[in-house]
């Protein structure tokens, strides 16, 4: 049995190896969503001949958690037919994947004639062969999402399977890019394999495996200890998706979190049935988001398979948290993944209020494709049509960070996704025929709270130098924005406007999606609404509110309306007596508050969803009364 010091040295080594694996993907992929946005993840996994287990991970946490299922399915599929030099590719949500847009490479690492460890990587490819570029937002079954990559071998006994590679690239709009993505993951996994071989050479296989088991046991003991400190009971919560981008709206995720001594059960009974829209979350993805929340609540516990041994997850089959084929899952990795995380975190708020906050992101992203007419255009990644361009503007998705106890929203991604990066605006303008007119945080958009959320990000851009353009507009969390915590207000909300200010202006908000041809000289506007606040905004330190006024996060009107803080317009100082009177009067007002700041109210009016929000409010009030 490994001693604790050796086990910790080996654990740290494997974590570092996972980081190297992840950085290799980011630095070698030709895909801007990966080399700029860092939408990828990877890890090192153990295998005892039966079960794949997470040992060390890095990158986007949803990818590395879901990779456990990918590894398991791939190994089960090829049981008895795995050999040194084999490389597996997986990308089917009903056979180990999350959705058809995320592809996984798995490299079994052999010792003593059988695989003992696995190096695995996952990223979001630029295109997966759907009827429309990148993502088919109108798919109504899994076959319309693109290629279904059930487990297959890219390499067998070290030999490249040319027919598989040719089949993949022949079914892709950007074959050079997708081949580069696969090679990036393969190279990263080879880095992971090399690191594990060096580790075993240094310490011996038995010592390494013993150390891994010791690490699993340590994390399990730590989580069980934490569960015992939380009060036993059943804690319920729900969250809603605006819609499924088909015919259904206000889709509910229902969860019950039960703590019983040193065990936890998370049960999604009562969640809405699966739909023919895009938001269904495949089982690996739902499990990943539950694990994301728990790891965010317990940052001092090493994240590995042992952490989750005390956890039982019940996913009712045929619901949006566990769909059955051929239901589409195209956006489930974010929506309803976001709502799954929010519901679980809301349940945890009842027993761990000082630990909660955003553990998810949500979608605000116009995807544009067409013809690049620039004379000196960037080298195309499509060998079939060198003038074809495809630009996925994911810069707004990042604005999801809520406040937490004693901490304002720190900007950009929520903590579990904070390894990611917004796409560089200047480089995007070189790569694609687009020009940004605005990229900045919006005044009064940060969700009010004792600690405030991150301000919303607003962008305005035109697509100069492009022709024959179409935009896929995808927005979620407008009607049901990212929530506040422990009395904090909700986020501002996400929406997109095409042809802003023109008679033919179109808003993708309440409907959530549109596929339109448009004039590239006209403006696209998008807002990503940021995460929620934490605690009652009337308890926020007036000096902190003043700082936000001076930084232009909050206006003078917003200071008074959202926080009850009166700031003198001339001297830019807090009027302490007026503030005390204002707050006392506000706290005496009867009835619950709406928990919305003036930035949220502006968003509701600008997006034209007043009637929809009023209806949702009435439904929720009725549900609370029951």
Image: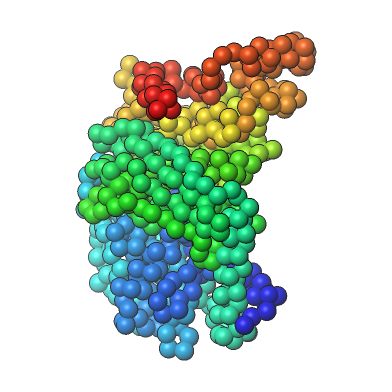
Can you tell which quarter of the image residue 197 is in?
Answer: bottom right
Q: Give the residue drawn at x 51%, y 21%.
A: 594
Q: Is residue 533 visible?
A: no
Q: Quadrant of the C terminus?
A: top left
**Residue 356 drawn at (x, y percent):** 58, 42
**Residue 157 drawn at (x, y percent):** 35, 83
Left or right of 188 in this view: 244:
left
The colour scheme used to paint the residues is: rainbow
Q: Is residue 547 above or below residue 586?
A: below
Q: In which quarter of the image is the N terminus?
A: bottom right
Q: Give the residue drawn at x 68%, y 79%.
A: 3
Left or right of 433 in this view: 210:
right
The residue nearer to you, when weighing 380 against 328, is 328
Left or right of 527 in this view: 577:
right
The residue nearer to you, when weighing 460 against 344, is 344
Q: Give the residue drawn at x 54%, y 35%.
A: 531
Q: Give the residue drawn at x 65%, y 32%.
A: 451
**Residue 603 drawn at (x, y percent):** 46, 22
């Amino acid at each position: 049995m490994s001693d604790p010091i050796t086990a910790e040295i080996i654990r740290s080594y494997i974590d570092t190896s996972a980081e190297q694996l992840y950085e290799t993907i980011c630095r070698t992929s030709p895909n801007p969503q990966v080399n700029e946005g860092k939408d990828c993840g990877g890890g090192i996994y153990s295998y005892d001949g039966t079960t794949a287990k997470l040992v060390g991970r890095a990158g986007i946490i949803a990818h590395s958690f879901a990779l456990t299922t990918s590894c398991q399915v791939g190994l089960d599929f090829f049981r008895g037919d795995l050999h040194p030099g084999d490389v597996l590719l997986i990308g089917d949500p009903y056979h180990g994947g999350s959705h058809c847009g995320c592809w996984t490479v798995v490299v079994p690492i052999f010792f003593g004639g059988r695989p003992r460890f696995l190096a695995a990587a996952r990223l979001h490819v630029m295109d997966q062969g759907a009827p429309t570029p990148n993502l088919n937002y109108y798919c109504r079954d899994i076959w319309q999402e693109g290629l279904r990559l059930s487990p297959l071998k890219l390499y067998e006994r070290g030999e490249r399977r040319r027919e598989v590679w040719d089949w993949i690239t022949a079914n892709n709009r950007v074959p050079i890019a997708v081949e580069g993505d696969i090679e990036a993951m393969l190279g990263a996994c080879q880095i992971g394999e090399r690191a594990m071989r060096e580790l075993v050479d240094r310490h011996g296989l038995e010592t390494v495996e013993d150390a891994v088991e010791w690490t699993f046991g340590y994390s399990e003991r730590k989580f069980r200890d934490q569960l015992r400190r939380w009060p036993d009971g059943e804690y319920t919560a729900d969250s809603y998706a605006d819609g499924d981008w088909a015919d259904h709206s206000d889709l509910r995720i229902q969860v019950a979190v039960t703590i019983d001594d040193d065990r936890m059960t998370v049960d999604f009974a009562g969640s809405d049935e699966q739909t023919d829209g895009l938001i269904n979350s495949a089982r690996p993805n739902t499990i990943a988001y539950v694990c994301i929340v728990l790891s965010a609540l317990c940052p001092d516990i090493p994240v590995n398979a042992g952490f989750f041994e005390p956890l039982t997850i019940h996913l009712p089959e045929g619901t949006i948290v566990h769909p059955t084929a051929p239901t589409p899952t195209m956006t489930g990795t974010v929506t309803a993944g976001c709502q799954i995380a929010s519901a679980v975190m809301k349940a945890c708020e009842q027993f761990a209020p000082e630990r909660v906050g955003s553990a998810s992101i949500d979608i605000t992203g116009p995807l544009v494709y067409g013809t690049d007419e620039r004379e000196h255009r960037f080298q195309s990644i499509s060998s079939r049509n060198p003038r074809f361009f495809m630009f996925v503007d994911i810069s707004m998705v990042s604005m999801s960070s809520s406040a937490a106890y004693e901490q304002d929203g720190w900007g950009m991604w929520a903590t579990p996704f904070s390894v990611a990066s917004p796409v560089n605006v200047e480089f995007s303008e070189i790569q694609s025929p687009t020009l940004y007119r605005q990229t900045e945080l919006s005044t009064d958009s940060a969700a009010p709270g004792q600690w405030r959320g991150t301000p919303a990000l607003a962008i305005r851009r035109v697509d100069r130098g492009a022709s024959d353009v179409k935009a896929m507009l995808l927005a979620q969390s407008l009607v049901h924005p990212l929530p506040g915590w422990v009395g904090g207000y909700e986020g501002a909300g996400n929406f997109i406007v095409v042809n802003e200010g023109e008679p033919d202006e179109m808003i993708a908000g309440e409907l959530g999606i549109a596929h339109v041809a448009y004039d590239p000289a006209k403006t696209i506007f998008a807002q990503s609404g940021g995460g929620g606040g934490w605690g009652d905004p009337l308890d926020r330190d007036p000096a902190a509110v003043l700082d936000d006024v001076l930084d232009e996060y909050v206006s003078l009107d917003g200071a008074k309306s959202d926080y009850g803080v009166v700031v003198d317009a001339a001297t830019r100082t807090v009027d302490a007596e007026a503030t005390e009177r204002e707050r006392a009067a506000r706290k005496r007002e009867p009835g619950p508050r709406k928990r919305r700041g003036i930035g949220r109210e502006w968003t509701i009016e600008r997006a034209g969803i007043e009637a929809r929000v009023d209806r949702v409010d009435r439904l929720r009030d009725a549900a609370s009364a029951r």
